[in-house]
């Protein structure tokens, strides 16, 4: 039931781009993206809504394909501060419940 | 404005002991939840609440109890600790972003629990 994230890990040089994918077996109402640095709490990046448009956050953007039940996170011109583990959180129920199913994460390491 | 506060940050228990992880938020959020994080497993939902007096089970509720007597507090009780409950526990709160959609989750700093 957990969404599948790919790749599991990726190593980049500063300035390179990356794409992280999240695929669910269930129809989704929304997809959240979070970043977690080692030993810290996850931090919200963005939310994509069913029927909504692509969202952006500085050089990080994301898309949501409702029909394919997939979301992708795009990191452009990566910076050292982008390092961490990225999680997608999916909502297959609808309604405001604070209830998400998270993927297993993608570890991103950005090197100088 | 402290956000979401969890205590304790670290705890070691023996098998069979009980304990309560505390979670408090000062943002007047309606919705609160508990997740556990294990290596390679991501975050898994234990219990959640959509308001004071209302709780429900998540993906992995066995061995845990919750209650929500106030908007601010959402404690998680381990009834009889087992080594399989060794994990990092995160409390989160959120509001509705409108249109009945779960909004941004605000996480506490986590509570690292080891059961021997």
Image: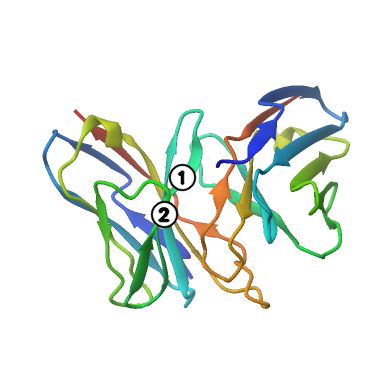
Determine if residue A3 is in view: yes
**Is residue A56 left or right of B109 when viewed as pictured?**
right
Say whether disc 1 or disc 2 marks the residue closer to the N-terminus.
1
Residue drawn at the location 82% of the way across and 51% of the way down:
A65
Q: Which colour scheme is used?
A: rainbow
The percent coordinates of residue A42 (x first, y second) are 56, 47
Question: In the rendered view, would you say A22 is above or below B3?
Answer: above
**Is residue A36 left or right of B68 when viewed as pictured?**
right
Residue drawn at the location 88% of the way across and 36% of the way down:
A77
Q: Report in which chain the residue with disc 2 lies.
A: B
Pick the residue in front: A21 or A110.
A21
Residue drawn at the location 76% of the way across and 46% of the way down:
A71
Q: How many labels sit on residues? A: 2
Q: Report in which chain the residue with disc 1 lies.
A: B
The percent coordinates of residue B89 (x first, y second) are 38, 45
Q: What is the quadrant of residue A82 in the picture?
A: top right
In the rendered view of the protein, which quadrant contains the C terminus of chain B?
top left
Pick the residue in front: A94 or A60.
A94
**Residue linked to disc 2:** B58
Q: Is mark 2 on a helix, strand or loop?
A: loop
Distance between the alpha carbons at the discs numbered 1 and 2: 8 Å
Question: In the rendered view, would you say B11 is above or below B23?
Answer: above
**Residue linked to disc 1:** B44
The percent coordinates of residue A93 (x first, y second) are 58, 62
Disc 1 to disc 2: CB gap under 8 Å: yes
Q: Residues within 10 Å of mark 1 (few under 14, many from 20)?
A: many
Q: What element carries label 1?
A: strand
**Is residue B29 left or right of A64 when viewed as pictured?**
left
């Amino acid at each position: 039931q957990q969404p599948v994230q790919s790749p599991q890990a990726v190593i980049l040089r500063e300035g390179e781009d990356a794409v992280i994918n999240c695929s669910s077996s269930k129809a989704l109402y929304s997809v959240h993206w979070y970043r977690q640095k080692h030993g810290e709490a996850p931090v919200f990046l963005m939310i994509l809504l069913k029927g909504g448009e692509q969202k952006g956050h500085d050089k990080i953007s994301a898309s949501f394909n409702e029909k394919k039940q997939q979301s992708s996170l795009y990191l452009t011109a990566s910076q050292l501060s982008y390092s961490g583990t990225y999680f997608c959180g999916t909502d297959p129920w609808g309604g405001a419940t604070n209830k998400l199913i998270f993927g297993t994460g993608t570890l991103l390491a950005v090197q100088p | 404005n402290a956000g979401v506060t969890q205590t304790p940050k670290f705890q070691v228990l023996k098998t069979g002991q009980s304990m309560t992880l505390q979670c408090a938020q000062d943002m007047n959020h309606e919705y609160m939840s508990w997740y556990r994080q294990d290596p390679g497993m991501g975050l898994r939902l234990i219990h959640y609440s959509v308001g004071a007096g209302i709780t429900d089970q998540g993906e992995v509720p066995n061995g845990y109890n919750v209650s929500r007597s106030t908007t601010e507090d959402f404690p998680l009780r381990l009834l009889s600790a087992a080594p399989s409950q060794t994990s990092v526990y995160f409390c989160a709160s959120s509001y509705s972003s409108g249109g009945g959609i779960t909004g941004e989750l605000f996480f506490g700093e986590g509570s690292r629990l080891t059961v021997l």
